[in-house]
Amino acid sequence: MSGDVTIRIAGEHDRAAIARIAELDSARPPVGPLLVAVLDEELAAAISLADGAVVADPFRPTAAVVELLVARERQLRGGGVRTGAFATRSLRRLRALAPGF
């Protein structure tokens, strides 16, 4: 993986890019609140915080980016560094920030 990577909550403005990546990945767009990975200023992958479904651009080297998304998703679900009430509150905040996903 080269370049800058940003992991953030998906917004409404990301819908078209997520749909495009899902189509390239021969998958359905993930549902629920999403985290996305932006690689070199272009959306490269997304993961659902609802069910862990992942889509990634198959024409870019995204394996390491997907690993980062999965690790962050696990942290938010309580399987990482922070657990318990903090993880529950974090997921509630994410769902409130991204109600359309």
Image (cartoon, rainbow, N blue to C red):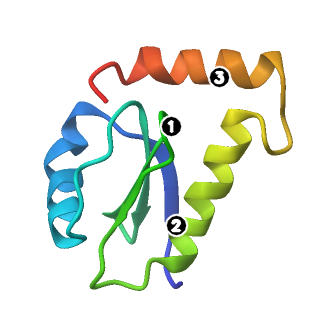
Looking at the rendered structure, the secondary structure element under dot 3 is helix
How far apart are the alpha carbons under marks 3 and 1? Answer: 11 Å
Disc ID at residue 90: 3
Q: Quadrant of the C terminus?
A: top left
Q: Is residue 62 above or below residue 38?
A: below
* Residue 3 numbered tag: none
For numbered disc 2, what is the local secondary structure? Answer: helix
In percent of width and height, residue 65 lies at 52, 70
Which kind of residue does numbered mark 1 sit on? Leu
Residue found 51% across the figure and 78% down from its top: 63
Vertically, is 7 above or below 81? Answer: below
- Mark in front: 3 vs 1: 1
What is the three-letter code of the residue carrying label 3? Ser
Q: Secondary structure at mark 1?
A: loop
Q: Quadrant of residue 81?
A: top right
- Occupied quadrant, residue 70: bottom right
Q: Which residue is identified by label 2?
A: 66
